[in-house]
């Protein structure tokens, strides 16, 4: 566990990985805790009607053991089992049961359409899926195209073409002997967000949870502390919900609130955190931006000890707003599906530096490199963010894609480095500044412009609810900055407002950074993890240019 040694360097120097040869995620986050304190609270499950069910670690162990017996009958080591459920007690138990039998858990977002499901289910070769009534109906549309799929379990009772999960589990023993997996054995398969191209399946070993722990502990000001209680609106099908919140919290014996809104509302999030005295929250930037627009944001009686956020860069205004509303500094962290939680800020160690992600988390070596020359970039020089291998948080491979796996790594002086695909800069303070993904960086009149800073600035205008920035092809400048804007309630799109917003940015950032093109849209294209799909925005602006 990460220990606070007063400053970043001392905390980093005092950390050492302890990765055992044999390790099982399900045993670690459930059975170990249940053996110690079976009556301790594990999951607070809040239904759509706001009814509450509390589940202990003992109950989590017993149900996951029953489910393990059911699954173990027809599943071999390493087989993929899909879980398509919202945040719930059953979701946590499913992931635990799957890892305890030595299979590989495949988390799937409940809002996936048939095409998204088909790609992930067929590419993974999943033999089983655990889902709800809505998921059963969705699977029925594509089941003829999934020859590997043998069983569909439903948590909502008996439904045609599905097995009643609770009924079959009730027939099983609550005692189960887990597989003694190695830390290097595969455990979780999470597909990338797919901002460009088809999503790839990042296969992770059991050790991935241990790899996440220092980053989670750092971003929550040294988790765990007495009375900690954590919640996130992020779906547990996303690495940010599953491995940044659910599993690390259970590892530390911290109760987790299971409550995934059908549609996120800022007022509902504030109400939940107040009613249940939430102490720790992971709030993605999209959620923070929506909460910031709530006129009653400062009126809630919150008891937050830590707030972490990651996925998109936070600006100065959002950090300052968070300190006022939450009573604590939002700790920004960085990672990706393939190599998560490797950079984080930590207000308990050093003040936030707005616009800068944070320090390399203890246990991880993160640098900025020049991919062409395979050398390390100097301070302030833009390059590719890279993490030194081996690292317990890194993927084993992209499933069925050895070429993409090989392309993910480079070698410098005999050492392998994982290339994240993101551009960044190293600052004098030793932090990493996020510039943007390779495809997102805009080249205009010789300047290289990262979209995140412009998006942050746009959000400071009261009319802007969401903003996505891309480059628009231009014969003279190469590219010019184009902004897609979703307006806040009460504002209407017109040319005068577009000019006002552009001037707002021009007066606050460099003259070459302001958006020369503004397009108002009704729905910002987002990934399931809450990131803006800039590839779709680029496609729109390129088509517009071609048809002009």
Image: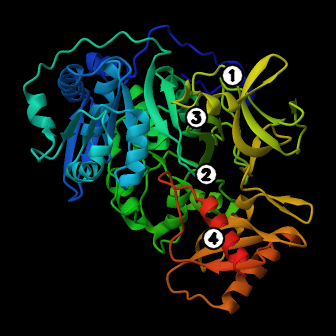
Residues tagged 2 and 4 counted as in contact (Cβ below 8 A):
no
The quadrant where residue 88 appears: top left
- Residue 499, how many percent across, how many down? 74, 86
Query: Would you name the residue on which mark 2 appears?
Result: 196
The quadrant where residue 248 appears: top left
Q: Please tell me which of labels 2 and 4 falls first in the chain.
A: 2
Q: Secondary structure at mark 2?
A: loop
Image disc number at residue 267: none
* Separation (CA) of disc 1 from disc 3: 12 Å
* Separation (CA) of disc 4 from disc 3: 28 Å
Q: Please tell me which of labels 2 and 1 falls first in the chain.
A: 2
Q: Quadrant of the C terminus?
A: bottom right
Q: Which mark is in front, 4 or 1?
A: 4
Which class describes the residues within 10 Å of circle 4: few (<14), some (14-19), or many (20+)? Answer: few
Q: Does residue 6 appear anywhere in the picture? A: no
Q: Please tell me which of labels 4 and 1 falls first in the chain.
A: 1
Image disc number at residue 389: 1
Query: Would you name the residue on which mark 3 appears?
Result: 338
* Separation (CA) of disc 2 from disc 4: 14 Å
Q: Residue at x 52, y 33 (%)?
A: 202
Q: Is residue 263 above or below residue 312?
A: below
Residues tagged 4 and 1 counted as in contact (Cβ below 8 A):
no
Residues tagged 2 and 1 counted as in contact (Cβ below 8 A):
no
Colouring used for the render: rainbow
Given residues 254 and 144, the one toward you in this image is: 144
Query: Would you name the residue on which mark 4 appears?
Result: 540
């Amino acid at each position: 566990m990460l220990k606070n040694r007063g400053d970043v360097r001392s905390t980093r120097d005092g950390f050492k990985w302890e990765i055992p040869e044999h390790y099982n995620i399900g045993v670690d986050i459930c059975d170990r805790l249940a053996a110690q304190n079976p009556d301790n609270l594990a999951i607070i499950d809040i239904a759509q009607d706001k009814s509450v069910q509390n589940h202990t670690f003992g109950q989590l162990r017993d149900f996951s053991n029953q489910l393990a017996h059911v699954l173990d009958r027809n599943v071999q080591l390493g087989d993929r089992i899909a879980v398509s459920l919202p945040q719930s007690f059953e979701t946590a138990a499913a992931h635990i049961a799957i890892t305890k039998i030595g299979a590989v858990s495949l988390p799937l977002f409940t809002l996936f359409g048939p095409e998204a499901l088909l790609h992930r289910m067929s590419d993974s070769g999943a033999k089983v899926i655990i889902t709800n009534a809505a998921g059963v109906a969705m699977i029925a549309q594509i089941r003829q195209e999934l020859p590997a799929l043998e069983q569909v379990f439903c948590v909502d009772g008996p439904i045609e073409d599905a097995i009643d999960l609770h009924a079959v589990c009730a027939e099983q023993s609550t005692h189960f002997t887990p597989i003694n997996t190695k830390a290097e054995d595969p455990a979780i398969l999470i597909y990338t967000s797919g901002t460009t191209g088809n999503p790839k399946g990042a296969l992770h070993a059991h050790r991935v949870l241990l790899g996440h722990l220092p980053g989670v502990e750092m971003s929550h000001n040294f988790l765990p502390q007495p009375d900690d209680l954590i919640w996130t609106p992020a779906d547990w099908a996303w690495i940010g919900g599953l491995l940044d919140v659910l599993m690390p919290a259970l590892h530390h014996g911290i109760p987790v609130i299971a409550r995934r809104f059908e549609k996120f509302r800022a007022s509902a999030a504030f109400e939940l955190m107040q009613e249940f005295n939430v102490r720790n929250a992971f709030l993605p930037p999209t959620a923070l931006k929506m909460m910031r627009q709530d006129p009653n944001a400062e009126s809630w009686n919150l008891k937050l000890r830590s707030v972490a956020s990651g996925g998109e860069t936070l600006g100065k205004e959002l950090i300052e707003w968070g300190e006022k509303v939450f009573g604590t500094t939002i700790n920004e962290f960085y990672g990706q599906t393939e190599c998560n939680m490797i950079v984080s800020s930590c207000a308990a160690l050093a003040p936030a530096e707005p616009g800068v992600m944070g320090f390399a988390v203890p246990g991880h070596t993160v640098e900025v490199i020049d991919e062409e020359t395979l050398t390390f970039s100097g301070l302030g020089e833009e390059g590719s963010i890279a993490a030194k291998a081996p690292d317990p948080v890194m993927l084993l491979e992209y499933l069925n894609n050895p070429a993409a796996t090989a392309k993910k790594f480079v070698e410098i002086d005999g050492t392998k480095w994982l290339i994240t695909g993101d551009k960044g800069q190293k600052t004098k303070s030793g932090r990493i500044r996020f510039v943007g993904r390779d495809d997102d960086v805009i080249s205009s009149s010789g300047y290289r412009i990262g979209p995140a800073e412009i998006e942050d600035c746009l959000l400071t205008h009261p009319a802007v609810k969401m903003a996505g920035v891309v480059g628009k092809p231009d014969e003279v400048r190469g590219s010019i900055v184009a902004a897609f804007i979703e307006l806040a309630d009460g504002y209407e799109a017109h040319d005068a407002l577009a000019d006002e917003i552009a001037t707002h940015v021009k007066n606050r950032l460099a003259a070459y950074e302001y958006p020369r093109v503004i397009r108002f849209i009704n729905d910002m294209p987002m990934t399931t993890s809450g990131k803006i799909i800039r590839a779709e925005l680029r496609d729109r602006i390129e088509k517009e240019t071609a048809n002009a």
